[in-house]
Amino acid sequence: MIPSWRTVLSKPPRWGGAVVFGVSGAAAGFVALAWLSLYPALPQDLAGAPNLDARAEHVRIEVSPRDSVDGWYLPARNGATLLMFHGYGRMHDRMWRYAQFLEPAGYGILAIDFRSSRARDRKPTTLGGYELPDAEAVLAWLERRAPNDRIGLFGESLGGSVALVLAGRHPEIAAVVADCPFSSGKEAIEESAERRVHVPRWPTGPVAQGLGRVLTGHDPEALDVRPAAAALSQRPLFLVACVHDNRFSLHQSRSLWEAAGRKDTLWVVPDAGHNEAWLTHRERYERSVLEFYALHLRPRVLPAS
């Protein structure tokens, strides 16, 4: 039987189910995106550099009584060791593109996998919640292993921000190179959403923060790197920023440079994307970094026995 027009009009539209379905779908999409952000793919990214894994000593460094970080260590021949931190969605082998010109100059190298980038019992990326304790543990290990070495830091992106905070806490760290770091977790999330994923900062930022807290137990916006940069006002810092960075604006690196006293090099690369300065200006990049470390990582003069 075909219903009359009065019967049809008397029934309210079934929009409630559609709305619930749409909201549920959006929520599921946010959760899926958050999960992929916490556990990104980890491609090997040597960019033609030799893989130094076989030459390095594989070490396991305790972070807590039940957990540890994997490191790859090449001892120094010039009295200075560089602790190297990879960026988001990368592993220690990313650092071999830089170690391949630093290690021949005599520098020791300690490259690590953050626990958020390891194969076994992988932790979520937390923009500092796990990564900073990892860095603290590795620094302590290096100071025990090579107590007379001068220590420098090198970091890309997330690793650059971790390096800055670690240096701010430890005055014994003599020099820092940070390639495209972020100035705060909040700005990293908001700008990456806008520039890389092409979604608005709001509500993406608050939603990502809330999901990050629920899924990891850590606030992904908690890390503020600027106070650490300010603590480096009396120590050397080399910052690299790229105009075509699809994650972070120049404002972030510039704010760190200003916080550190505007005394250091801020190399703004006009024709490169995120962490691409070495690819586009390899000769200048390597020369500049080598000159920076040579100037600021002179070996300690030990007292006569």
Image (cartoon, rainbow, N blue to C red):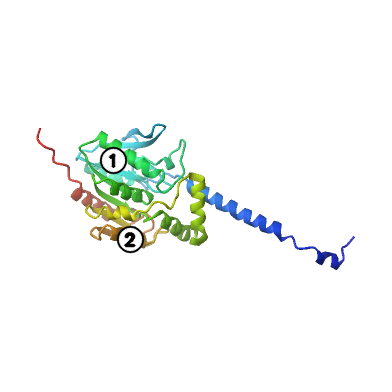
Residue 22 lies in quadrant? bottom right
Label 1: which secondary element: strand
Residue 133 lies in quadrant? top left
Label 2: which secondary element: helix
Horizontal side of 1 relative to 233 (left or right) equals right
For residue 20, above or below residue 218: below
Amino acid carrying label 2: it is: Ser
Q: Position of residue 274 (x, y in %)?
A: 38, 56
The quarter of the image holding the N terminus is bottom right
Q: Position of residue 116 (x, y in %)?
A: 43, 42
- Residue placed furthest toward the right: 1
- The residue that disc 2 covers is 255
State the residue at coordinates (85%, 67%). 6
Q: Nearer the viewer, residue 227 or 25?
A: 227
Q: Position of residue 251 (x, y in %)?
A: 36, 62
Horizontal side of 220 relative to 282 (left or right) equals right
State the residue at coordinates (42%, 56%). 188
State the residue at coordinates (18%, 50%). 295
Q: Residues within 10 Å of mark 2 (few under 14, many from 20)?
A: some
Q: Residues within 10 Å of mark 1 (few under 14, many from 20)?
A: many
- The residue that disc 1 covers is 109
Asked if one can make out residue 39 in the rendered structure from this viewpoint, the answer is no
Q: Position of residue 190 (x, y in %)?
A: 45, 58
State the count of labels.
2
Q: Nearer the viewer, mark 2 or mark 1?
A: 2
Asked if one can make out residue 149 in the rendered structure from this viewpoint, the answer is yes
**Mark 2 or mark 1, earlier in chain:** 1
Mark 2 and mark 1: span between their CA atoms?
29 Å
Amino acid carrying label 1: it is: Ile
Residue 300 lies in quadrant? top left
Tag 2–tag 1 contact (CB < 8 Å): no
